[in-house]
Structures are given as structure tokens and as C-alpha cells.
Image (tube, grey):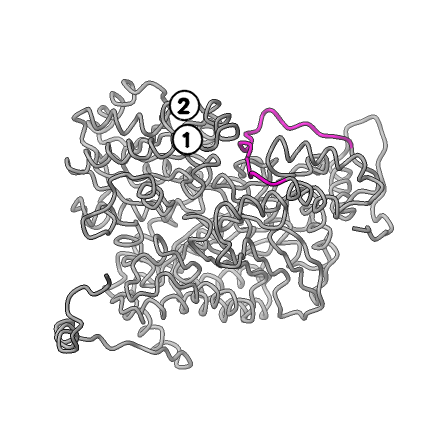
Amino acid sequence: MRRRQREPLYNVVMADRKPTPAEDLASFRRELLDGIPAQLPSMRALDPTLDHAPPQNPRLTQSERALAVANALRYLPRAWHGVLATEFARELAQHGQIFMHRFRPQHALYARPIDHYPARSRQAAALMLMIQNNLDPQVAQFPEELITYGGNGAVFGNWVQYRLTMRYLAEMTDEQTLVMYSGHPLGLFPSHPEAPRVVVTNGMMVPEYSTLDEYARGRAQGVTLYGQMTAGSYMYIGPQGIVHGTTLTLLGAARLYLNLKGDAGLHGRVFVTSGLGGMSGAQAKAATIAGAVGVVAEINPAPLKRRMDQGWLMEAESDLDKVLSRVERAVRDKQPLSLGYLGNVVDLWERLAREGLPIDLGSDQTSLHNPFQGGYYPAGLSLEMARRMMKDDPAGFREAVDASLRRQVSAINTLAKRGLYFWDYGNAFLVEAQRAGAEVSLPNGEFRYPSYVEDIMGPMCFDYGFGPFRWVCCSGDPRDLETTDSIAADVIATQAAVAPQEIKQQMLDNLRWIEEAGSHRMVVGSQARILYADRQGRRLLAAAFNTAIARGVVHGPIVLGRDHHDVSGTDSPWRETANIRDGSRFTADMAVQNVIGDAFRGATWVSLHNGGGVGWGKVINGGFGLLLDGTQQAADRAHSMLGWDVANGVARRAWARNPGALFAIREAMKSEPALQVTLPESADATLIEAALARAGLGGDTSA
């Protein structure tokens, strides 16, 4: 790709002294504006202090390997190809992908104040901030491989894509839109100020080819990307992004199955799970917020240490005898505790199954959407042995994973007979366990354990429109986050005071959450917050924040967003839409319509992805980002877009005849006369059975 020449906007500082902050800022801006450098950069070694993604084995043919190298070289001047062709071929052989490590930027990656970004468009500067937050080594799982979380949830496919994207964002105006194809910046296209500044798609495969093998092939060739949910959408805010939802899940499970009432916590109750990496890192913090004793297994010492250093995990232990002893003491004292077990989760479950220690709640949050490429490590192998086997003996590794899953499920089943309540955390645990031959199915073919959305988050939150609303203070000032917390608490308190009984507990849970959020030290990376809110709440919060910016109470713009794991954003039959039982849970109209509607109602950027927490080909999800800058235009866009973003999913859930959603959409129509939604009639099941019998269709005729 030929690089367009431009005059440098900043002077180069050449001196044998430490640069001043102003010089650092000038160098940072200059590198962003340059995009692909004029001179071939020096080689850069991987940082040994960072955790790195395990090597992949995409099993390409010789012609596919050649295509992968040719695809990488097309970004760069032909004069460099003689050097880079060999280099990229070696990366492909070593990593199974071409990351272009030579082109990693010199500047540090973290979310800077928005005014530090050299952008003509304020909206584009907000995107630059969010992209850098996703790649911050304090936030990202494998930052040098551009992977934010989930083992393979990437922001870009290579470092040249990062450089080009940041240059485009620096140059663009509010009359252009940047189009992103699976990490590749297709270019800037003329549009208009009300259009999204960026439109992102990730992994949108033709359905027949939406398989893991095709993904591995396309990813190695640099033509597709697994954006997870918020990684490829530039909306990741660290493990805080799901800690509120995880806390609500624990409280909901306890109310549903352990007879907890109102604001009672889980003191003296034990929750066992696995995973301390990206999103799974939220589990330890959520357990202690809920008052439980949380035991989280993690085989990789790097994320465990990170969660300890960040204050998300209280204690760590590698000896199972000591783990059990510590749990018994915490249960006896009814002391909230998050305890990381450095070891394999299967060993933990099997030991618990042999002991008499009561376990109340359990789940699993390993990255089983990616079971054979580092998302799950089988029992009996060290981390290093597993990573070698993954690359050198993929068939043997698959067998080891399947055997491990069968053992894990067997232990969980034993504990379930003693009173454990276990749920699938939407990470494809049950799907992969079933494929491996584990005993997770009932005689009628249904799963033995529910998805946590199926009987907790779906009927308690999503059906009523409550979901994971997020905001990021672009000033980077912690005081602005404190101010927005206070504003949000006032908004939710006002809502809670007049809330109907159907959603009273949800409102009180959310109020308690935001009043305590600052004390839980959840910020990693950008100054961001997560708060479950419904349609009305999100609109009220956006309006209050925008007014605070206009009045100077908040000292910079705010980016609004959400997790895709929300009311309307995702079609996923084993997770977000698990409690939709009208036969439509395998369709993806909702997620696609969500992105289309957000785009023309004022979103700053929108994204549509194949894949997510449950895996490639098993989910379609959409997201957005919206910048509040204190103007009336921003207020109007937020009111219009946020209303649709929630109502779309509530209307679909109401059409599925979900009682909570029927209540919520009727309330929405009362408050907004322009909203008119098709509502269902409920038919009598006995009448239908009699009609089928009269038509000769009685009994199961599917065979």
C-alpha cells in the first residue's frame, strides 16, 4: 500500500536527555499521524514481562501459507518485501499468525486524556482513546498479540492495521466514516455529521463456512478476526465490565435456590468456579461484593498475579489441602473471601467431590468457546506441556481436553447430588462437554444444568430491559468518575422511589451497587463504570451526564456504551437468548436490527460480530459507542438511540411471550405514544394438543 506523504506537524526532539512531558506528547502524536513509518523500523523482541498467547496450528496448505504472507505484505512498500517476506513467514511458522511485531508502536498503550489525541474530530479522538484502552497491558490479556480477552478476542489482526486505523482516525472529519473489515481499515468514506464515525464488522462469515477450522484458516491468512464482544468493538473496560452482572447473578441464584431474601448477602456460602483472565477475572471481586467465599481456579500464574496486584483477588494458594482449610475457616467466620487456586480446575472439583465440604454455587468461566487453542487446559498437563502439545500434537490435545471435560462434569454431578447449584456461564461449557461425551444431558435431550441467563439474568433483568450500561470519562480524571457515580446514584434513587413492584428489587440492587462502586477499586485502565440500567434509566443517565458536561461539572466528554451481553445486543441460544422459547432463539434478526437501528439513530460507532463468549458460529452480537459532549445534538442522539437499543430486545422478548418483557414493553408504550409494538396472544396448550390430535398429529412424529 502506497503511503501518502504529509508534512510533519511536530518537531523532532533530538537530545541526550529525558524528554519533557510536552516532548513525549509531541512524539506520541507524531507517531500516530505517521501511520506506517517512512523508514523500516528495527526488529522488536517480545516483552518477557507480559503474558503471551499460545502458538496456533492453523494447518494451512502450502498455497494458503503463501497467501497469508502475500496478504500481509500488501500493507507495506515493495522495497521492504525482500526483508519482510522471510520475517512474516517465520512469524507464521512460530505463532500460526502474522502479527508484524516489527511494527509495534514506540509509544505506550493506555487511555490518555482525550485532548492528547491529534484528531480533527472529537468523536474520532474518543475512538482512539478506547482502542488504546483495549490494548493497555494492564487491561489486555495478550497485549502484544492484540488480544484483549477470551484467549482470542482481538482488536486488530496485526500492528500495521493498528497504525493505519489510528492515522485514519487522526485525519478524519465529521463528514467521513471509517469502515473496518475484521480489523482491516478499508478506508475513509464520505458521509455526514449524523452518521457513525466508524462502522465495524468482525468475522461475518457466510454461514456454511462459519466453523472453527475456517476461522483458523481465515485468521492465519489475515482476512477475518474474532472480536469477541467488546474487544473488537473498542468498548472493553477490563473485568469491571461484567462484575456487576456477575454480582447480580450470584445474588439471583441465591434468592432463587438458597432462599436468600432482599438485601441479604451470601455470607458463609461457597461459590466455586474457574478463570481469572479477562472477563472471568470479575468473578473473584463479585464473590466478595456479594459476601460469598469464592474459590477460583486458574492454571496460568500470570493472570492470577495480575488480579492479586490489581486488588481483584484477596488470596492465592497452590496447595489443595490449604485451599480447603482456608475455605472452612472463612465459612465458619462468614467472612467474604476470594481465593485463587493456582492449578487445574478439574483437580479442584475432584477433590471437592471426595470431601464433605458443602459447596452451594458453582460454574465455569474458562474460554471454552476456544477449547483447543488455549481456552481450556486439560488436567494432568502443566501449562507449558499443554501449550507444546497444542501446537505439536493437536489431535492428542483434543483427546486430552475431552477426557478432562468428562472428569470435570463427573465431579460436578457428584456435588450436584449433594446440593450444589451449578449453571453454565455462557462460555460454551455445556456444549463442549456434551460434544466430549460428558454426562450433561437429561433423558429428554435437554441440558442437566441451565444457562445463567435461562433462569437468572433473563427473567430477572433482560426481560425487563435491565442490562450492562457503561460509561468512560474521557478526561481521564478520577474525580470525573466520582462525580458521575454521584449523578448516577441520584438518578437511580429517583427511579427506585417510584418503581413498580415488578422491578423494585432490581432498582434497589442497582442503587446499592452504584453507591458502593467507588469503594470496590474496580478501575483498570480507563476511568470507567458499569451499572445495570433499564431503558428509562439509560436515557436519564445520559441526559444528566450531558448536562453535567455542558455546565463544566464533568471536565470532559463521556463515552457511553454497553456490554454486548445485554437485552438487545446479542442473539445466542445458549446465553443471551436462552430464555426465549418461541423457537426463535437460533435466529439473529435482533442483533442485526440492533446495529442498523443504532447506526441511524446517532451512535458514534457501531459493530457487528460473529462469535463471542459462546464461540465462533454460535452467536451474532452487536455493540455501539456514543460520545456525549454537552451539546443538544448529543443529548438528542442519546435519547433516540438508547431508547431503541433497549426497546428492540424487550419487544422481541415480549413477542416470545415472556411475562417480564410484556410488562416492560407495555410500560414503555405508555410513556412514549410513538412506540407501537406488536403484542402476542397466548393460546391454551390443551386446546392446541386437542387440535393436533384431531389432525392426526398427536404424539412425536419427528422420526
Q: Is residue 104 above or below residue 652?
A: above
Residue 59 is covered by the magenta coloring: yes
The residue under label 1 is which amino acid type? Tyr
Residue range in magenta is 42-61
Q: On screen, 19 above or below 546?
A: above
Between 82 and 132, which is closer to the camera in this rendering? 82
Task: Find numbered disc 1 in the image and state the secondary structure of the residue it sits on.
Answer: loop
Magenta stretch encompasses residue 63: no
Residue 653 pos. (x, y %): 33, 66
Q: Residue at x 44, y 42 (%)?
A: 279
Name the residue that disc number 2 marks. Answer: 381
Mark 2 burial class by Cα count in 10 Å: few <14, some 14-19, many 20+: few
Mark linked to residue 693:
none
Amino acid type shown at disc 2:
Leu
279 left or right, relative to 443: right
Q: Residue at x 31, y 25 (%)?
A: 347
Q: CA separation, marks 1 and 2? A: 8 Å
Seen in the picture, residue 353 relative to 589 is either above or below; the reply is above
Residue 510 locus on image (x, y percent): 34, 53
User: Residue 152 appears at what percent x and percent y?
Assistant: 52, 41
In this rendering, would 16 be left or right of 534? right
Q: Of 583 and 35, which appears nearest the observer?
A: 583
The image quadrant where one finds the C terminus is bottom left
Q: In which image quadrant can residue 462 be found?
A: bottom left
> What's the residue at 29%, 39% (across, down)?
437
Query: Residue 702: x and y, percent?
Result: 24, 63
Please state the total of marks drawn on the protein image.
2
> For mark 1, what is the residue?
377
Is disc 1 in contact with disc 2, using a CB cutoff of under 8 Å? yes
